[in-house]
Amino acid sequence: MKSSGTSRRSKGGSGKGSGGWLDLAGALLLLVTVSAIAAWYHVSHGHVLWFGDAEAHLNIARRVLDNRQPGFDQLGTVWLPLPHLLMLPFVGNEELWRSGVAGTIPSAAAFVLGGLFLYAAVRRVTGVLPAAWAAVLLYALNPNLLYLQATPMTEPVFFASLLAMLYATVWHGQSQSIAAVLLAALASCCASMTRYEGWFLIPFVALYLAFGGNKPRFRQGMLFGAIASLPPAFWLAYNYWHYGNPLEFYNGYYSAKMIYQRALESNMRPYPGDHDLRAAVRQYQAAAELCAGLSLAIIGLGGLAVALLRRWIWPVLFLSLPALFYVWSIYGSGTPIFVPHLEPFSYYNTRYGLGMLPLLAFGGAALVTVAPRVRGLLLAAVVLTATVPWFAYPRAERWITWKESQVNSEKRRAWTREAADYIRRHYAKGDGIYANFGDLTGILREAGIPIRAMLHDGVHPTYNAVAQKPELFLRESWAIAFGGDAVSQTLIRSGQRGRPYVCVKLIEVQGEPMVEIYRRADVIGEPRKQAPSEESELDEDPIR
């Protein structure tokens, strides 16, 4: 790892490590403008919460503040907490929560920050201003990333952390500065509290910081490793404290691993790539091509050959790590990627293919450095070749991340809308709702009902007491359930034990579980109280 390819001066370059402030301001203006236009488009068209995960991330952040038992123990498990924490300053606002914009703001800010770090890192590595602009343009004009940065998804925050680490390690390779080590450690902590890929990066970065410079800096590598290991240690302790299992996020009931295991036990076919390395690579390659675009894939791979010839080894290795993690996850951890032209001819987790975007953008930037006299022309050629296929026919149908969210949410959005319309018309202030937290929480958000009205599975010990003795502890006026779920079964037992609930609304969407809306039998027929859409105490939201 001695040859990092991060020398201060590249052949034909300016020698300025991070470029001038004016250049950086130009990159900032570009990123903010593109981000704002894309966010406005997706917010105005109502796309922000089409991903089921986006709805869940937003509502997890909201329930930390708006809950019968508010607090940080409401962050849950499986998903890492930083994206939810970043939404807290915004999600308490009723309108920002209901529209999803509370999740758009931190994602868009992270998108801008990630682009700036990519620009600065490429400027340091190559010393070539057009190369830095090529990288930031290839990153910023990708419509799949532009969609995700308008949503509460975790990828933009992870990219900001990843690219901050890239910049910090490149800086360290040039200077062996302790400040660079601390920046890398801070960025690693953010990555490790956003996505589990961040955990995977830690040993590679620690080794590079220890041995990748002009002479070994073992203590600096150790310092980075010690700081960067704190978030994984915290998350293990958090899971042990709250769930009695430090690996609850990995092998607990709601973990991807156990969900997959239950599906296999129900005779579902294994995911493509499960313990099949060739198929795992094929699935990920297909997703990467769809996310980055075939043109950029070809340009980027060609440019990576140039980067290796110029001995820019560390940036290529580092930016390859997320793709390696995803292939490993497909192969061994039950993490699926479905693309429409490969079995099972569906859409799922296609956004993971964006893990290749920073690497391919760096490859495109390296290609611009080939001919010093025509770098401006090379910049234009690379960017236009990679982006014209997206914008010559600017249809969202061609953006795989948007298309996945549209296809997979259509039925969920249909029953959410119908249930929210019904609840909005009949719900009154002070009514409690018994339901499991999850997809059903979207009904409350769309109806404008605070989450604190909901007795859900994150409210302990009341929820557990209701499950055991509903005739004694179940007092909610309403209940919402999927047919056959735990809430539905509890309501059956409650009726058998003398506290009946009446199903007042069934919502059936083909291919989806039946949504059942119940009223407590002894409140049916009571005079309707003031609705939450009218002036009421529910509108006086204490967390605004």
Image (spheres, helix red, strand yellow):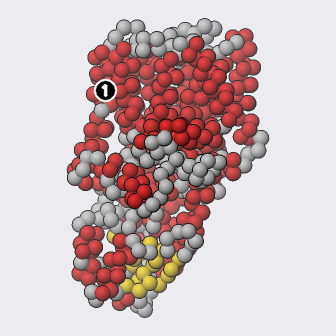
Quadrant of residue 2 in the image? Answer: top left
Residue 515 left/right relative to 474: right
Residue 248: percent from the left, percent from the top?
30, 50
Quadrant that contains the C terminus: bottom left
Q: Mark 1 belongs to which amino acid? A: Gly
Q: Is residue 110 above or below residue 271?
A: above
Query: Is residue 302 visible in the rendered structure shown here?
Result: yes
Residue under the point 31% across and 81% down: 493
Query: Is residue 365 visible in the rendered structure shown here?
Result: no
> How many residues crowd around disc 1 within 10 Å: few (fewer than 14), some, or many (20 or more)?
many
Residue 109: percent from the left, percent from the top?
51, 40
Residue furthest right as drawn: 392
Residue 479 left/right relative to 244: right
Residue 233 left/right relative to 293: left
Q: Is residue 217 above or below residue 526?
A: above
Residue furthest bottom as drawn: 525
**In-front residue for pair 68/255:** 255
The residue labelled by disc 1 is 225
Mark 1 secondary-structure assignment: helix
Q: Is residue 8 above or below residue 400?
A: above
Quadrant of residue 206 in the image? Answer: top left
Count of numbered circles in the view: 1
Residue under the point 61% across and 58% down: 407
Residue under the point 28% across and 73% down: 467
**In-front residue for pair 404/377:** 404
Quadrant that contains the N terminus: top left
Residue under the point 39% across and 71% down: 485
